[in-house]
Amino acid sequence: MRLAIADGDRSDRVMHPRKSQEAIDRLLGEGTSELGRSFSGRCLSTRARWGNPPLARLQTANEGKRGRMQSFDRQRRGNEADLPGRMVAFADAGQTSAATYIYASDISPERTTRTAMTTTLKQVLTIAGSDSGGGAGIQADIKAMSANGVFAMSVITAITAQNTEEVTDVFELPPSVIAAQIDAVFDDFEVAAVKTGMLSSATIVETVAKMLKPQEVVNLVVDPVMISKSGHTLLKPDAIEAVKKQLFPLALLVTPNVHEAQQLSGIRITSLAEARRAAKVIHGFGCQHVLIKGGHLIAERATDLLYDGRFFHVYKGEFIETPHTHGTGCTYASAIAAHLARGSSVVDAVQSAKTYVTEAIRHSLAIGHGSGPTNHFYFLAER
């Protein structure tokens, strides 16, 4: 646990470690020496790093009165508002339970029990590559998930040097590091959905599949990213077979665009009829649902096709003429994962995500010198 101090006034003084320790012990009772030492050390190390602000002080009242606690000086942030709820303690990463908070109004020698905060956001994991330009990959996934009401977590598989015009370099992370990231997330969080994107190599695909299989992820959305908007290959040829054989059987939904669906199925797609044939082939690899994203490459533009093994659902949308669609596929799949995590059916999750991504494209950003990104938080500008 880390201890932050909260009260009305502010100070640039730090108490002596021993005195601070004694005050904390009097305030919270015995058994808190480790917490007090940690707190005192943090205060002093903060002073050593930054000088006076932000600093903390423990101020005790007369005997018999409740302890009052001083908040971290927020001068560097320019925020003079009081801390909401007068929060005084928060949890470090690595815990296996919900975050624990102590409120100033709750602290007294007679009351030392901690109150657990209720978690309200579903947690969704994206496993994908990093886009240094911020428009696609992990960056787009996190934005889309956040915009659709969930808490996003990430596992990075590869680092790309990328902007709106091109991908200039790719570095694949070691499989052991990828596995460690996945293990760290599942060890601590209640993962309600997982979305995969750029996996790059057969080794990485095998690692991800091996790590996800024992987790029995109910809402796994596989976006088989094969090529970037600028034409750079993001999935090696041998990895395509690995995706089909090892990852698709675990997936609730697979979301290829027309290019990817053609490569996966071996069927040229120029119409909805051909998309139906391709969807059946892809479904045969073991996934529960297939969503072929039509975009502008079939006659019925902005039309997507969902297949569940028995029925087809057609999603017709507005086609928006714009070159700024970088990260559209990542955004779409991530929004679907977010709505699945929140309890929507596949059919409803796709509809909600399509509505969202259409507006994100409508409000796309003409930044950079190439294909600009979709605007994940377009709705904020309207407030």
Image (cartoon, rainbow, N blue to C red):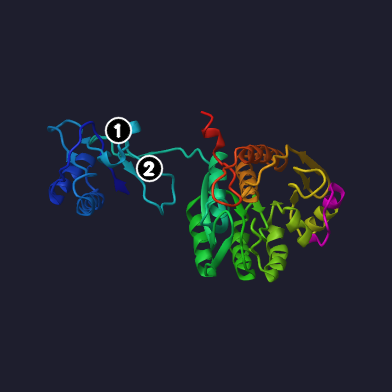
Q: Nearer the viewer, residue 196 or 249?
A: 196
Q: Is residue 144 magenta?
A: no
Query: Is residue 191 visible in this depiction of the protein?
Result: no
Instruction: From the top left corner, tell me how far across and down residue 59 is, in percent.
Output: 17, 37
Using the rendered view, name the quadrant where residue 4 is placed: top left
Quickly name the residue at label 2. Answer: 100
Q: Nearer the viewer, residue 247 or 370?
A: 370
Q: Nearer the viewer, residue 54 or 216?
A: 54
Quickly name the residue at label 1. Answer: 106
Instruction: From the top left corner, tell me how far across and down residue 70 is, in percent.
Output: 22, 37
Query: Is residue 37 visible in this depiction of the protein?
Result: yes
Q: Is residue 273 magenta?
A: yes
Q: Which residues are magenta?
A: 265-276
Residue drawn at x 28%, y 35% as measured from the top left: 111
Please, is residue 109 above or below residue 181 in the view?
Answer: above
Instruction: From the top left corner, tell me how far across and down residue 166 is, in percent.
Output: 59, 59
Q: Residue furthest top?
A: 383
- Is 15 left, or right, of 146 in this rendering? left
- Is 267 left, or right, of 133 in this rendering? right
Residue drawn at x 26%, y 50% as measured from the top left: 35
